[in-house]
Image: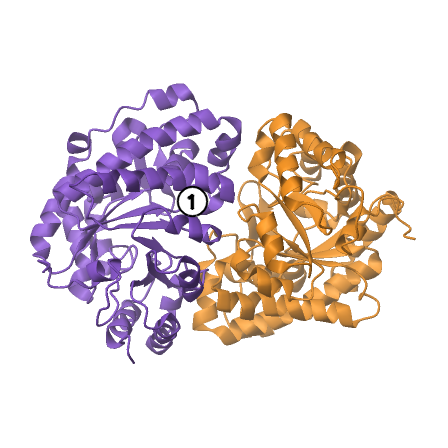
Chain colours: A purple, B orange
Amino acid sequence: MSKYNNTRLLQALKRQTIDVPPVWLMRQAGRYLPEYRALRTKAGDFMTLCQTPQLATEVTLQPLRRFDLDAAILFSDILTIPHAMGLGLSFTEGEGPQFAKRIETLRDVKALPTLEVEEDLSYVLEAVRMIQEELHGSVPLIGFAGSPWTVACYMIEGSGHKNFINARKMAYQAPEVLTALLEKLTIATTAYLKGQISAGVNVVMLFDTWGGLLTPAYYQSFSLATMQKIVANLKADPHTAHTPIILFSKGAAVNLEAMADSGADALGIDWTTDLSMARKRVGTKVCLQGNLDPALLFSTPEKIQAAVKTLLNEWGQHPGLIVNLGHGIEQHTPIENVQALIAAVHGASYSS
Amino acid sequence: MSKYNNTRLLQALKRQTIDVPPVWLMRQAGRYLPEYRALRTKAGDFMTLCQTPQLATEVTLQPLRRFDLDAAILFSDILTIPHAMGLGLSFTEGEGPQFAKRIETLRDVKALPTLEVEEDLSYVLEAVRMIQEELHGSVPLIGFAGSPWTVACYMIEGSGHKNFINARKMAYQAPEVLTALLEKLTIATTAYLKGQISAGVNVVMLFDTWGGLLTPAYYQSFSLATMQKIVANLKADPHTAHTPIILFSKGAAVNLEAMADSGADALGIDWTTDLSMARKRVGTKVCLQGNLDPALLFSTPEKIQAAVKTLLNEWGQHPGLIVNLGHGIEQHTPIENVQALIAAVHGASYSS
């Protein structure tokens, strides 16, 4: 038996039949929580929260004190790797991430140091250990990384530009530079996730936020292929082979079948795709995670309850569902509506 | 026979077999052209270009002097309707559109005046007449409007925020306000497109840039349903029944089958979907327009030629293809690459 009191997430990831589906929310530790905003103000900036294990631990645990969530997710950022490689990451309120340096040439890629996870990202590993101590096995802890393509988007663009045209241009203008960058990031990301697993996370998730900006052919060669390598690397190592992997490519639903063949245990589905349709397309190969519209959480508890009921009814008796939003929770989401969502999932059952 | 010298676009829209597919580019009259930038600098701002028929005519014709395009598209903006309704549109360089007022309540919606196209948007109709005079039947002229949902996004948000969370929230929080707004916009858009057709445009296109931000259910009820009404209104009027309609919902490929049932003659396909796959899904119901990645135009003439060849080979012998980009042409696109794209399409043939 598992050492966890709450095994719903791990069971769902194995596509086992369980009482009710697990529920957690992308960015559940975040700005919609007043206690998060207070801590961030006190810390001064976002990177201090990420880089101080005590603070990252506190932020990770905040939503679990309020809500009956079935998982914790490490509080961190997908850009810790390039920051550790010396690109100089900063966050300005309302502006998003900004790098001091950006990647333009093969020389820039070659100049990137090899990531030494235990040293360069020790603050993340320390946070994982502290969080697990605090969780006491109550719920599993999800670790994560950005996909190589998504992280490369920011490294090439230098910031979070809405359509990442410079990264997309590089795929056509200098594919050898992009490929070299992705190779470095694939190695670094594999090492990073192995480090997180070794420090104690129970599940890992790859956030491919910008995979959906690519043509299907380029999605496969520049985004999915690198994620497949990471998955294969983790599955080939006896220390990490049994840790479930969730892969989330936002806005890339046309590629669902290919994603299901990635070797990942679960796929995140965004809110613009029908979850039952997604299940029909991927069959029983993978568990699916999603996909309520984050905007739904601005309605009423009654409407949220109805939406959850619809989602679960359409899903039916199939195992392998993790309820989540289809994207990160929005900043001004009312707390009582989050409560209503989780209660609605836990109040449901596969048989009713 | 048609009065047009170049009938490729109109024939493709009827799914007739033609020598080579027609090609035009979304935002072909735009910032990548030095002569456009010069005129915009002279005019002072974007709205002056839109609102001065002589200038809008000149800008519309600029790409046709350089390239062997198979269609002209009216130079204008999808936000002319809310501007005409008194919301006070302005454009700041690099900032995108901004409204002086925004829509929040039912009172705001009710306060919107009924659009009197002949008066309020006379500058657009005058531009259409002037362009047609200059075109002398050389190529057909495409008119356009934003979809009610997309225009509502900007009216509710007040600007071009990347995920239009306020518009999406309204769908859940105050659907009656959104519905009332969409109804007004549906009526206004129908009248606007009828006005454009009456002034002389040969084809109309509905730009649903933000349809892909909605769940499939909400896409159907808030975006597609309003476009269907507009299509039905145009098809029911003998003066507009024979003008082909192109519908373009960016990022909404999961809904392709529903779009194909909209009554539109053609669907625009963005670059993140495989065009041949799209054809397999919609069959012969509609013509398809697309879908090269705008980032491709930053590569080389040779790569562009190869990409066009791949697209045409995969498409095969089927009629009903209009070659275009999958999104508007990017600002810094090299002119010689646009040339290469058009030459590659016109140098191809269905039979080789």
Q: Hey, what amino acid is under mark 1?
A: Trp
* Residue B110 rendering spot, x and y as whole percentages: 59, 74
Residue A316 sits in quarter: bottom left
Q: Quadrant of the C terminus of chain B?
A: top right
Element type at mark 1: loop
For the point 29% across and 54% down, the residue is A27
Q: Viewer-proximal residue, A162 or B17?
A: B17
Q: Is residue B16 visible?
A: yes
Say which residue appears at 35% left-offset and 78% top-offset.
A302
B317 lies left or right of A248: right
Q: Position of residue A273 (x, y in %)?
A: 45, 60
Q: Disc 1: which chain?
A: A
Q: Quadrant of residue B68?
A: top right
Mark 1 lies on residue: A210
Up-down relation of residue B84 to residue A216 (above or below): below
Q: Is residue B224 above or below residue A224?
A: below
Residue occupying the far bottom of the picture? A352
- Viewer can see residue B185: no
Whole-percent x and y of residue A43?
Answer: 19, 45
Question: How many marks do you count on the picture?
Answer: 1
Picture residue at 29% right of the left edge, 40% below the top? A232
**Residue B100 locus on image (x, y percent):** 56, 57
Relative to residue B102, is residue A273 drawn left or right?
left
Q: Nearer the viewer, residue B342 or B89?
A: B342
Asked if residue B310 is positioned above or below residue B185 in the image, the reply reads above
Circle 1 packing at 10 Å, graded few (<14), some (14-19), many (20+), is: many
Figure quadrant of residue B223: bottom right
Nearer the observer, B160 or A10: A10
Residue drawn at (24%, 45%) of the image: A76
Q: Give the vertical position of A81 relative to A3 (above or below).
A: above
